[in-house]
Amino acid sequence: MPEGSARGDQHVRGMARGGGLNLLGALLSQAAVFLIMLLLARALGIREVGRYAQCYAVLSLAGLLSLSGFRAGLTRFVAVHLADADAPALRGTIRLGLAVSAGSSVVLAGALAAGAPWLADRLHDPGLVTGLRLVALALPASTVCEAALAATRGWRTQRPFTFIGQLYEPGARLLLTALALVTGAGLTGAFWALVVAGWSAALLALLALGRLVRRVPPARPVHRPGELFRFSTVSWVSSLSSTGLIWVDTLLLGFFANPDIGVYNVATRLVTVAIFVLAPVNAAFGPYLAHLYHRGDLDDVRRVYAVATGWVVRLSLPAFVALLVLPGDLLRVFGGEVATGAAVTVVLALGQLVNAATGPCGTVLNMSGRVALNMADNLVALLLNVLLNLWLIPAYGIVGAAAAWSASLIVVNVARVVQVRHLTGALPFTVGMAKGLAAGVAALLAGLLVRWLVPGWPGRPVAGLTAIVAVYLGTVLALGLSREDVMVLRTLARRRRRGGPPDAAGDDPAPAVDEAGRAVSR
């Protein structure tokens, strides 16, 4: 086997180890968040779900404001400094990123707590004041946790990110929210659950980062704020724009005093479950891309991009098929009134399907240093989304908000595919993806057949989901697996037999460095 091919195989296996762990974590994380929404809807009603969603939207946007773009910057520069065996710069980057993020989050938290009555008035709901102030209390913890976990990913390990960010924090929040509802603490108790889970997760994230940093020999930190701030400022605007694309419709629905905010957010949460694959694959893919692009290995960049996109599409297709075939049945789990969001679910699913099919193209731009280009893409998408929302929400309500989000997603992702093609020569479309789409069409027909045969039957959702999954898997196997698919499955099987990686750096770690900055063997 040629050296380049063997090296590419090694990177694919490393991504499989980290990506497999991330997928498990993302699945459990989305399940926890889904159950939180379900508990709130069943115990408190759909109006309280809308309040929770609006406050969480503010937390997400404020968290990105306070992170100042260091999430992507920490991952990239930690990976680069490890590749260059530059221990002083590594320590300086981590200290600077954490300090700026923590300081800015405290300032923003104070401003949010003081301005909570004004913001609640703008959203036409004075009942949001308490939730906004508790969100302000959780903001510094959320920011520090995100920054610390972003730094750990620079070691090309996914364990801290998965176990703390995707398992512990949402799991603790779910348990504490359930406890709050059982004891009668209501929505205020659910917000306190967010605070307690966030601060405890932040402590664990700092401990995990400290454990990795201790593996690097002591060195006097060298701070290079210029390169970090240049990258992170652009990345900050880009991330803020992309997060705004997710949450701006919720806030604009509040500004227009739309009564269906809760219904809209239940529908969007259901669609988010379908796209859960994208975030963990991005997290596993990003550090490898930064490492490979920094070394100039464009052939391997193209290969891992194609493999990552194939995972996203084929793992998420059954869920998208279910959303298109059984939207009302799935939403009815939250209560009869929520079933009116079926049209929202279908519209959002179409936009997110394009998002999945184009793969981690935004990560390719970021980790190859083209953050300014990615920022421009996100700003255009956000501006388009806001304009479409201002036009469509007054006339069409939550369906208009869904259409605005989907249209923006399609435009920005098609643009990114063209840009990535020009940058690296890579395209996300492979034979494996074509096989997955063919299997998706077969599963769609099976689901539609079940829906037509048993209209109104209470067991239709279970029968439909079973038929969709069975036909999809059967068609995928009948069409055959690619060489990379077999390699990934074997890697995951071996890892399962071993009971997981031996340590946190088990995902193809970068070399250790000595005091002089030279690479040394482990």
Image (cartoon, grey):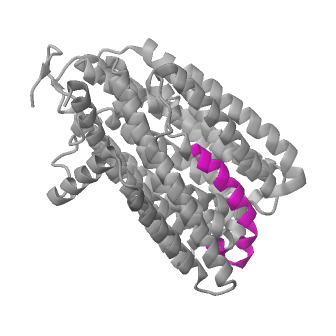
Residue 436 in the image, given as x and y percentages of width and height:
48, 53
Vertical order, 200 against 73 (above or below) = below
Q: Is residue 281 magenta?
A: no
Residue 494 placed where, x, y %? Answer: 18, 54
Is 346 included in the stretch rendered in magenta? yes
Q: Residue furthest right?
A: 395
Left or right for 17, reference 392: left
Q: Compared to 424, does 159 lie above or below?
A: below
25 displayed left or right of 397: left
Is 130 situated above or below 87? Answer: below
Residue 106 screen position, x and y as percent? 52, 37
Question: For this view, does 264 lie left or right of residue 395?
Answer: left
Q: Is residue 264 above or below residue 72?
A: below
**Magenta part of the chain:** 329-355
Q: Name the image quarter holding the C terminus.
A: top left
Q: Nearer the viewer, residue 200 or 7?
A: 7
Report the residue at 50% width, 16% height from top.
Answer: 230
Q: Main secondary structure of the magenta part?
A: helix
Please report the residue visible at 31 percent of the width from the left and 18 percent of the height from the top.
Answer: 295
Closer to the camera, 293 or 197? 293
* Residue 373 found in image quarter: top right
Is residue 109 visible in this depiction of the protein?
A: no
Q: What residue is at 38 percent from the left and 13 percent from the top?
A: 224
Q: Residue furthest front?
A: 479
Q: Residue furthest left?
A: 521
Q: Give the position of the N terminus as an image quadrant.
A: top left
Of residues 23 and 85, the one nearer the viewer is: 23
